[in-house]
Image: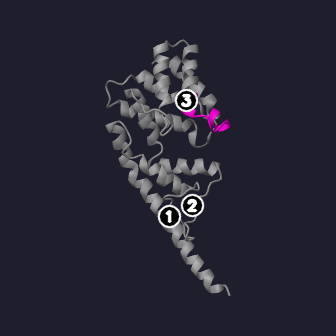
Amino acid sequence: MERALYEQMENCMLDAMEGGAHDAEHVYRVLYAALDIAQTEPAADLDVVIAACLLHDIGRAEERQDPSVCHAQAGAEKAYRFLIEVGQNEPFAAHVRDCIRTHSIGRGASPESLEAKILFDADKLDSVGALGIARTLVFRGERAEPIYTRAPDGSVSDGTGDRQISFFREYKRELERIYGELYTARGDALAEARRAAAEGFYRALFREARETDEKGRAILRGLLQ
């Protein structure tokens, strides 16, 4: 890829980022993970991979302004228009658009091309392991959502089957199920290598929260007349 095109796309990405869990550093990690995966996929078009990674989250602002908008769909169209405007050919722009359109889990069609699968896996790798836990806590904190909620019996819920949003619910509903849903062998291997860190943190956090709650409530019951 020509450096000039890379810098144009990088500047487009930087202009669209607003910080938080989906900041520019997230984009760079996705790019670097995708390049790692692509090293094991000789048939991958690296120019498409690089472009799709750099531009995959440029539709976040539209989704923040209107939650009914899917950032993947909005970003795909923005990326297509941008690439055409900077002189890229239509097939290349369309391929990048398709990759971005299918990178978000549960938000539409599944990735079909190899490059789309690489982007999907690289993006999901930033939601697993220690990084995934950290980013989820940042993301949920931005929305003032709790770490946990209460089960019907009043105890600290582990998140399983919860209706109210919390970090524990997000872990059980989303983070825990990413493993095994990746498309590339390298992506799957990288995710599995990070799995223990996420599971260990979740178990420790749940244990500390529940133990503190149970002991404290028991002491309080004994003190109240």
Could you tell me how far apart the alpha carbons at marks 2 and 1 are, in whole angstroms? 9 Å
Q: Which residue is mark 3?
A: 73
Vertical comparison of 214 with 203: above or below: below
What type is the residue that disc 3 sits on? Answer: Gln
Q: Earlier in the sequence, mark 1 or mark 3?
A: 3
Whether 70 is among the magenta residues is yes
Q: Earlier in the sequence, mark 2 or mark 1?
A: 2
Magenta span of residues: 62-75
Tag of residue 148: 2
Query: How was this image coloured?
Result: one colour
Q: Are the residues tagged 3 and 2 within 8 Å (C-beta)?
A: no
| Residue placed most toward the observer, 107 or 52 | 107
Q: Which residue is mark 1?
A: 206
Could you tell me how far apart the alpha carbons at marks 3 and 2 are, in whole angstroms? 31 Å
Q: Nearer the viewer, mark 2 or mark 1?
A: 2
Q: Position of residue 172 (x, y in %)?
A: 47, 54
Q: Nearer the viewer, mark 3 or mark 2?
A: 3
Q: Are the residues tagged 2 and 1 within 8 Å (C-beta)?
A: yes
Q: Position of residue 52 (x, y in %)?
A: 48, 27
Other residues around mark 2 within 10 Å, as few (<14) / some (14–19) / many (≥20): many
Vertical comparison of 5 with 117: above or below: above
- Give the dominant element type of the magenta stretch: helix, strand or loop: helix
> Does residue 2 appear in this view?
no
What type is the residue that disc 2 sits on? Answer: Tyr
Task: State which quarter of the image contains the N terminus.
Answer: top left
Left or right: 212 with respect to 31? right
